[in-house]
Amino acid sequence: MESVIDQACAAALYSEGDAGLDTGASLLAAAPDADDDAHRRGEEFLRRAWARGWQPADVVRFVRRELDEERAALAATLIAAETTAYATLPPRWSGQLAELPPPVPRNRPDRFSYASALLELYRLLLRLPAVEAVGPPPGGSPAGAGPLPPPAHDEPRMLTRIRALLAKAEATDYPEEAEALTTKAQELMARHSIDEALLAARTHSGDQPGACRIGVDAPYETAKAILLDAVASANRCRAVWNSDLGFTTVVGFEPDLEAVELLFTSLLVQGTSAMARAEAGQRAGGRKRTKTFRQSFLMAYAQRLGSRLAADTARVTAQAEAAGADGGGADGPGNDALLPVLAARDVAVSGAAERMFPKTTTTRVRGATDLDGWTHGTEAADRARVGGREGRGITR
């Protein structure tokens, strides 16, 4: 005999519209003894998602994008329960789980509404497409790979220092201070990337590029994707935007991936704050806030940032090469071999990105149409010391 959860899923998940959803929710609402089975079914859908390349943050972000915050919190509750079954979790998962929305109580505000939300969530989970894996699923390990290398001994201290600089840049009301703090953070990131590259070359560590996914949320996704691409390029990574699913996959070595995540998040906060201040000035001058102003502002901000970030990285690299011209030793390369080491890592990153995404397209974006928005966005990027290339495309 078919169980209640099977009947409810058959009614709700394999049909379109609200009628099947209402039927399934009614069946679950009338069967309190099926509650545990209903939640276990959701955990099964999550395991399918992990096998298809999804990670906890991806699922919650996509549910929020396609449904709403309530269903996203429900997904987070199921994820928290499902992941307790694993003795160890893949890299990055612990951080993602720590940032999930808090668990929601069962059967609130009433049994029918809760069951309906649950089945609507399952309908979406069931239809998640396969995505490129950016790490092993729980309980697995990368094919052909040994244990992950331990982090560099100074990594936590360095990342803590970078986070602190960026937090100060976000909080200050003085553009010049934000500029200096952001520039210093990028310099530290570039220096840390160089140190890690040289250490890997000296020790023949065999490190390989990895990947992570970063959400690119509405509104103004195109401008945000351009900004993320600029940050990734300046930090020796490759970025590929999936506009349909609302995220960018960034490919690179682990220290550089961490730098991209930190800097992109901070620059987005700084840009949004600068845009709000510019809009306030526009309103004071009698002009209403417009979508075209915001779009143009963020496009200019993103495009201007890339070249400035790239210049910062190039300057730090040149300084490191000059300072270490008499380095080197019997056990491996010194800073005099820096450029070949970095070139080899660039080749490795490009190769990994091409294997992961053998088919991509570069899309030209529409030009900005609001001159004031473009001007203010360019000025904000100059203050943040991060900018991009004119006419930049996005890899998709």
Image: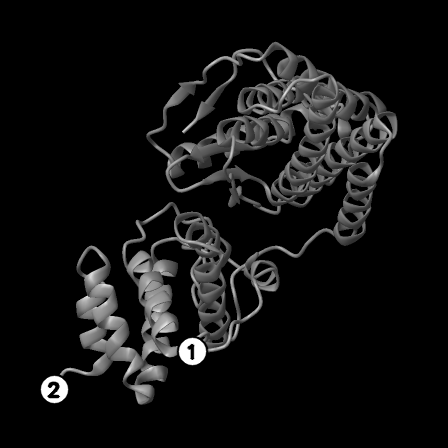
* 383 vs 351: above or below: above
The picture quadrant where one finds residue 281 is top right
Helix, strand or loop at mark 2: loop
Viewer-closest of 380 and 343: 380
User: Visible in this render: residue 172?
Assistant: yes
* 127 vs 265: above or below: below
- The numbered dot on residue 229 is none
The amino acid at mark 1 is Asn
Answer with mark 1 or mark 2, whichever residue precedes in sequence.
2
**Residue in view at x 23 percent, y 71 percent:** 24
Q: In which quadrant will I find the N terminus?
A: bottom left
Helix, strand or loop at mark 1: loop
Q: Which residue is mark 2?
A: 1
Give the side of residue 238 with respect to residue 337, left or right.
Answer: left
Q: How is the image coloured?
A: one colour
**Residue in view at x 53 percent, y 41 percent:** 209
Mark 1 and 2 residues: CB-CB less than 8 Å, in contact? Answer: no
Q: Name the outermost residue toward the bottom.
A: 33
- Separation (CA) of disc 1 from disc 2: 26 Å
Give the side of residue 24 with respect to residue 259, left or right.
Answer: left
Viewer-closest of 165 and 198: 165
Viewer-closest of 22 and 303: 22
Q: Which residue is mark 1?
A: 107
Give the side of residue 28 with respect to residue 203, left or right.
Answer: left
Q: Position of residue 239 (x, y in %)?
A: 50, 32
Q: In which quadrant will I find the C terminus?
A: top left
